[in-house]
Amino acid sequence: MKEHLEAIDIAGRTLRVSVREPLVVELHVLALATALRVFERYPVFDELTLGNGITETRLTRQEMERLLGADGWDAVRERGRWRQTLARIVQSYSVTTLGEEGMR
């Protein structure tokens, strides 16, 4: 995904990432995967915004912890569970957040 990276900006406890299209995954999926890695590795960040110039996805550490549930950050740290954890989080995020957008 490095070839899609356009810019990174740090403002306080917020990391802002700009990417170029075309992406091989949906923007919100890339944002969720990025947020998992960033928040797990860099506790200084509390917010991630990932955008492509047209739309953006904003995620907070608190929101990611809610999506992780009881397994917490241990599920992210275990390499063998990474794909399963990401898939579960994408599904939960899609049902709650994207479902709410459809209700508006």
Image (cartoon, rainbow, N blue to C red):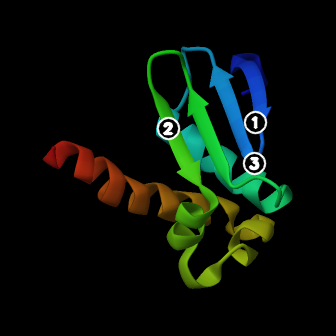
What residue is disc 2 on? 57
Q: Quadrant of residue 17?
A: top right
What residue do we see at 41% from left, 63% from top? 92
Look at label 3 and name its amino acid: Arg
SS label for mark 3: loop
Look at label 2 and name its amino acid: Thr
SS label for mark 1: strand
Return the residue nearer the eye: 11 or 98: 11
The residue furthest front is 12
Q: Nearer the viewer, mark 3 or mark 2?
A: 3
Q: Position of residue 74 (x, y in %)?
A: 74, 77
Name above or below for residue 6 compared with residue 85: above
Q: Is residue 26 visible?
A: no
- The tag on residue 11 is 1
- The tag on residue 13 is 3
Q: Quadrant of residue 79?
A: bottom right
Mark closest to the chain's N terminus, 2 or 1: 1
Q: Is residue 72 visible?
A: yes
Look at label 1 and name its amino acid: Ala
